[in-house]
Amino acid sequence: MPTITNIDDLKRLYRRRTPRMFYDYAESGSWTEQTFRENTSDFYKIRLRQRVAVDMAGRTTKTRMIGEEVAMPVALAPVGLTGMQCADGEIKAARAAEKFGVPFTLSTMSICSIEDVAEHTTKPFWFQVYTLKDDDFMQRLFDRAHAANCSAIVITVDLQVLGQRHKDIKNGLSAPPKLTVKSMADMMTKVGWGLGMLQTKRRFFGNIVGHAKGVSDPSSLSSWTAEAFDPSLDWDRIAQFRKMWGGKVILKGILDAEDAKMALKVGADAIIVSNHGGRQLDGALSAIRALPAIMDAVGDKIEVHLDSGIRSGQDVLKAMAMGAKGTYIGRAFVYGLGAMGEAGVTRALEVIHKELDISMALCGRRDVKTLDRDILLIPKGFEGDWQ
């Protein structure tokens, strides 16, 4: 077994062990991928202040996200098709998150269903929904999430229209994968992945097939998906979803201070500063650049989280020091899952936790809840000097 010391180690294994179309699905953005790249590169521009001769005994990374205790301020983000990265992937990732003590968020476009994940875990998890037109389907989704004891709903608000991701189109991305000469030649080299897929019954979108009207098999899914998303979404509709759910609501996909204010008005419990991992509006600001203006606008009135670009414990540290109360990892845990299954997700969490803990100590802090801008060196004009 190779020695894993950072997330990039997992990424290299993941690339070797997972079919190309699913690797590309995770490791890509829309259009030119500028925002996808800057989500990570902008973190590098922020430096840390080293402090010495500070008592570092008794450190803790424990805190709370939407009132729930977490071992560190990191949740697993909702990622569609996770069960195609590794057989039963959502179940494995949820188990790893539960054991580690961090939240897991299940995507509506998951391979394992809400019921599958609930059956294989013991603690509440979060469930992500899109803003779809079909009220009956949405209400049944919420009811299923309640029955599964989900403790929060994450509403994705930045996917009214799908951003174009060139690689997915060229690869013919689907679940299960279409059997072409190209895809079969690639999959034949991923023996471990293939054996896992042969041994599971979960190969379709478990929350959709058999639940949405007219979707009784995978062949009818594409036409449903094309019609399901609501391009007429507005804030009244988001407020309606909040009432339909009746529990804690996190809005994912906020990148502008004015939208953050609107999220506050509709009564969200938290917002996630996110650009969908650079997969929607290419040319938008990175999440970490967008964070300061949003913190200035609403940071003392609503819980602000950050997603998009987190690849290390130092990224978590920087986001928290800039005011976020929690962060999310998507690609980082997917790398681990594709590389080593449940153990790989655990390893990704261990790597990030260790980096966060040691970096926090070297900045002179013992408690993650005390992090602030005093530990950072932020370049002038970091948010951008725009006209």
Image (cartoon, rainbow, N blue to C red):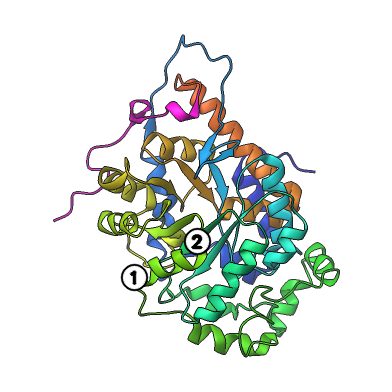
Estimate the spatial distance between the alpha carbons at disc 1 and disc 2, rounded to whole Å: 15 Å
- Which residue sits at x=66%, y=75%? 205
Identify the amino acid type marked 1.
Asp
Based on the picture, tell me whether residue 372 belongs to the magenta stretch: yes
Crowd class of label 2 (few under 14; some 14 to 19; many from 20; radius 10 Å): few
Q: Position of residue 177 (x, y in %)?
A: 69, 78
Dot 1 falls on a residue whose secondary structure is helix
Dot 2 falls on a residue whose secondary structure is loop
Q: Is residue 370 above or below residue 166?
A: above
Which of these two is toward me, 321 or 216?
Answer: 216
Question: Hey, which residue is sitting farthest left in the picture?
Answer: 387
Q: Earlier in the sequence, mark 1 or mark 2?
A: 1
Quarter occupied by the N terminus: top right
Q: State the mark number for residue 236.
A: 1
Contact, CB < 8 Å: mark 1 with mark 2?
A: no
Quarter occupied by the C terminus: bottom left
Q: In this figure, what is the number of numbered marks?
A: 2
- Which residue is identified by label 2? 246
Q: Position of residue 131 (x, y in %)?
A: 46, 72
Q: Is residue 370 left or right of residue 337?
A: left
Span colored in magenta: 367-387
Identify the amino acid type marked 2.
Gly
Question: Hey, which residue is sitting farthest top in the picture?
Answer: 53
- Which residue sits at x=42%, y=21%? 50
* The quadrant where residue 183 appears: bottom right
Q: Position of residue 345 (x, y in %)?
A: 68, 48
